[in-house]
Image (spheres, grey):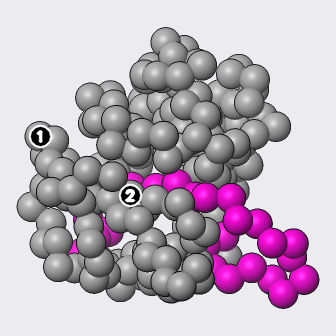
Amino acid sequence: MPRSRRRGEDAAELPSKPSKPTKSRPQKLRIIGGSMRGRTVVYHGGTFTRPMRDSVRENLFNLVGMAVRGAVAIDLFAGTGALSFESLSRGASRAIAIEKSRHAAGFLKSTAETLGVTNQLTVLNGDAFRLGAGVLGPASPNAPLDDTPRLVLLCPPYAMWDSMNEQLRVLIRLAMEHSPPGSLIVAETDKHFDESRLPPGDWDHRVYGGTRLSLIEPLIQCGLRS
């Protein structure tokens, strides 16, 4: 590896019509590379999701390179699922997308059906901190050994790096301590984010516009996960 998204009115004498909920317009995000290149992922348009820009996603996977091949992509704040689908398109063996919003999770499943990858994508609808800890933490003693490398993607709403920094650090530490050899962890933050608020390690930081991508490979010592 090279060195160096969620952000009353006074009563009137006469009753007024209830306001209609704001409707968002679905948009399409394109898959940039791999076997599904050019195909689209539907973004539901909800303001609770901030899709990674195409140009940043392209730069991200240029940095990831061959590490995605055969890996399990773990997309902790999946949103549109664009990172999960991009990973599958570029050779990931499977992907786990964790998304809290039922609305967004429904779009994720629908897109997986359209792209024909339902057998490769597991969509978990729930809290990323609770579910993510179970996915990233130590395997059950009765579980078969799985040494498949991981591509761990943490792209939460930028404000969460301040409001829930310690919880995010816990997820990163779990990934660093329990990911098999050959794994890669990616954290997306605002470009002004203080790098020292990430867990200590040999991070590779890259800035693209207003976005910072920070990548790290979990250390392997004496053939064991650290």
Q: Is residue 136 visible?
A: yes
Q: Is mark 1 on a helix, strand or loop?
A: loop
Residues in magenta? 135-162
The numbered dot on residue 209 is 1
Q: Residues within 10 Å of mark 1 (few under 14, many from 20)?
A: few
Query: Farthest top residue?
Result: 38
**Residue at screen point 74% across, 30% down:** 117
Which residue is found at the position 68% from the left and 82% from the top?
138
Above or below residue 33? Residue 61 is: below
Q: In the image shown, does 122 or 61 lie closer to the viewer?
A: 61
**Tag of residue 42:** none
Q: In which quarter of the image is residue 64?
A: top left
User: Label 2 amino acid?
Assistant: Val
Nearest to N terminus: mark 1 or mark 2: 2
The spot of residue 192 in percent (x, y) is: 9, 61
The one nearer the camera, 90 or 189, is: 90
Going 43% across and 22% down the picture, which residue do you hit? 32
Find residue 56 and report its horizontal and vertical position in percent: 27, 36
> Is disc 2 placed on a helix, strand or loop?
strand
What number is the disc on residue 186?
2
Q: Where is residue 89 in the image (x, y as percent from the top left)?
A: 58, 28
Q: In this view, does 23 lie above or below 122?
A: above
Residue positioned most to the front = 222
Question: Is residue 140 left or right of 153 when viewed as pictured?
Answer: right
Q: Locate residue 53, reporting x and y percent.
A: 30, 33
The reply to whether the magenta stretch includes residue 224 is no
Residue 139 is one of the magenta-drawn residues: yes
Circle 1 or circle 2, nearest the eye = 2
Q: Which residue is drawn at 42% across and 32% down?
A: 45
